[in-house]
Amino acid sequence: MNEFRQDRTTGLWAIIAPGRGRRPRDLKAARAEDSPLPAFDPACPFCPGNEHMLPRIIDEAARDASPGWSARVVPNKFPILQLGSSAEKDPLGTGYGEHEVIIMSPRHDADIADLLAADVQALVETWFGRFEAVQGMPGIEDVVLFCNRGSTAGASLAHAHSQMIGMPMRSPRVASTLAWSAAYHRDHGRCVVCDELGREISAGDRLVELTDAFAVLVPFAARSPFEQWIVPRRHCPFFLLSDDRERAALGGALQRALRRLNAAAGMVPYNFVLEPGSRDADHAPFAHWAIRVVPELTTPGGFELQSDVIVNPYSPEDNAETLRQAVVGPSG
């Protein structure tokens, strides 16, 4: 039976409609979007040896093996926002901000799921380092970390990369989530994400993985088939306040989530986004950071665009069971 479900951590609505059916050709079409990639593309600016195609190199995670780096940070050549002298004058009117690209591997054909454990950890530390650097820039209020994988998920280049955008305003999505969490805390005296985690761990039917540091689950009101939510089990209000255990475990949790997605649905396009929480001390009791992995397996139609109620043609409970059964090997 179809159901309206509300995400208890954000207030967003979804209709879970497995009765609509999901024809096998839909997933097959998504998997077939990208052809196999070569290990090196002479036309790709992110491949080693093509540094002349880059604006400059901001930072690198060094490694002993050739080409001497495992992750690299560069300015976005076509930025959404860019720094200038207007931070204190009219930052919104002039599009003030920072836009960086994190190249996630020297290999043109590698995704996070393919990386060595040491390279995944270097990537995580690069994210933390650049997030702190961008957050500390004058006039920056909010930092958005995300990855688009596959052209239908918004990627303009096939070489695996994530992006970081610093904005002079709090993003509307973060603001609305914080407002929802604040209201819940006023009413109940607790963090809504911590409460939701407790419910999901007790129920178990949407839980995919549970470790000392993180819970991975399919959200109760998932807005995409095979969506996964990676959440610190410890109450942690802001990404940069993660402790050493969480920083060491994050890469593995994300890598396994992506491997499960590949095993369950194939090499489908996806986005992952950081839900950063908040650095404001007043928000510490109710803010809670997380990462959301969202496969691009459905296309919103007119109903979704007008109502902002997403129709998910898969059962979150069935998706979680499929993901739990997926085989994920050790980092290569």
Image: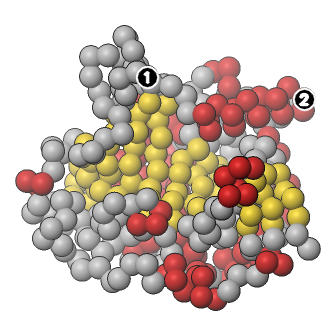
- Residue at 60% of width from left, 82% of height from top? 26
In this rendering, the label closer to the viewer, 2 or 1: 1
The numbered dot on residue 92 is: 1
> What amino acid does circle 1 point to?
Leu
Q: Which residue is mark 2?
A: 187
- Residue at 44% of width from left, 71% of height from top? 113
Q: Quadrant of residue 63?
A: bottom left
Lateral position of residue 156 relative to residue 190, left or right: left
Q: Is residue 227 visible?
A: no
- Residue at 47% of width from left, 63% of height from top? 153
In the rendered view, would you say 32 is above or below 45?
Answer: below
- Counting residues from the N terminus, which is met first, the one under dot 2 or under dot 1? 1
The numbered dot on residue 64 is: none
Q: Which residue is outermost to the bottom?
A: 24
- Secondary structure at badge 2 equals helix
Please state the horizontal and vertical placement of residue 159, each as a whole percent of the image. 30, 66
Image coloring type: secondary structure
Please state the horizontal and vertical placement of residue 59, each as a whole percent of the image. 23, 44
